[in-house]
Amino acid sequence: MEKSNFKSGFVGLIGRTNAGKSTLVNKILDRKVVITSGKIQTTRNRINCILNTKDSQVIFIDCPGFFKPKGLFGERLSNTVLSVLDDSDLIVVIVDAAAGIGSGDLYILNRVRERRKPGFLLLNKIDLISKDRVEREKEKLNGLDYFDYVGEISAKTGENVNGFLKNLIGKLPEGPRYFEEDMVTDQPIGKTISEVVREKLFENLSQELPYSINVEMERFEETTTANGRKLIIIGCSIYTERVSQKAMIIGKSGNMLKTIGSRARLELEDLLKSKVFLELWVKVEKNWTKSESMLNRFGY
């Protein structure tokens, strides 16, 4: 049994696109649990990321960036964010201080206030701006006294992250250990593999194209090589909306797809601690971002 003063809870990470939510999660857990990128809407699902300590278990809920939805796919992502607001014991709002606090951030802050839950506010990316600039950004938040904690951090370098964590755990209610101590996420391995491939697509393709891409793992087979080494065979389908997009993903003489596959394979080998054979297929599913059935299939 856990100690009577054991603390636990679900902490929703909320913020605009590219505020640094996923980067913060990876820094806190000291490993890559969720994918990151400079492109919009990199995170599409709610993912439980679990920090275990001797006296607490913090379940960070990473989710899509808060934005004004356009179309069915955008509405699905927006609903995911709203569900995190409702399901969290404590809410952490992360703003990009380097980009400047704007009307979108203030809209999010007011939505958080409506929930009347314990709330933390973090000004992120302070490593990119001067202290004077940080203070000027903080002045825009005058009157927001409903937050239990306001802090300045760099999710990238880790500056002030430990102080934030100490205060966060102090605010959690007493509760049980919801997940086993060795778990860092409850995301299925198939989804993790798909996300690694999608990250490599984001890193290598143009700004607009990744939004129209989804990845599904279709094969996972453990076997051994001729010399007895463990080998994992993985097959993933990359879905896009138009034939022209398919051509861009494949690239001239298949070079783009080879690059994406090679980079994804190396990361998967590190993740799975095994030799990996990765096969990628590119398929066209016309207007999947507007299809109820396809969005349901892809888990959105």
Image (cartoon, rainbow, N blue to C red):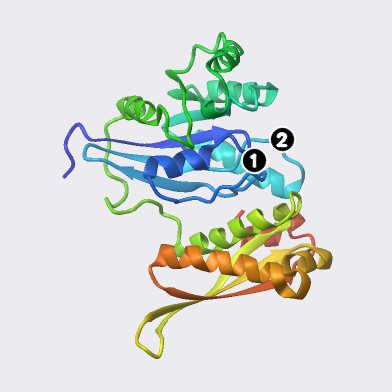
Q: Earlier in the sequence, mark 1 or mark 2?
A: 2
Residue 70 position within the rendered picture, expressed as x and y whole percent measured from the top left: 76, 42
Residue 75 position within the rendered picture, expressed as x and y whole percent measured from the top left: 69, 43
Decide: is 96 above or below 58.
above
Numbered circle sitting on residue 241: none
Residue 141 position within the rendered picture, expressed as x and y whole percent measured from the top left: 58, 14
Q: Is residue 124 visible from the viewing direction of this image?
A: no
For disc 2, the marked residue is 68
Q: Is residue 184 left or right of residue 72?
A: left
Q: Residue furthest bottom?
A: 226
Residue 182 versus residue 116: which sits nearer the camera?
A: 182
Query: Is the residue marked by circle 1 packed among few (<14), some (14-19), or many (20+) residues within 10 Å?
Result: many
Q: Hey, what amino acid is under mark 1?
A: Ser
- Residue lying at 49% horizontally and 15% vertically, measured from the top left: 146
Question: Spatial distance from mark 1 to mark 2, Cα to Cα?
Answer: 8 Å
Decide: is 140 above or below 16.
above
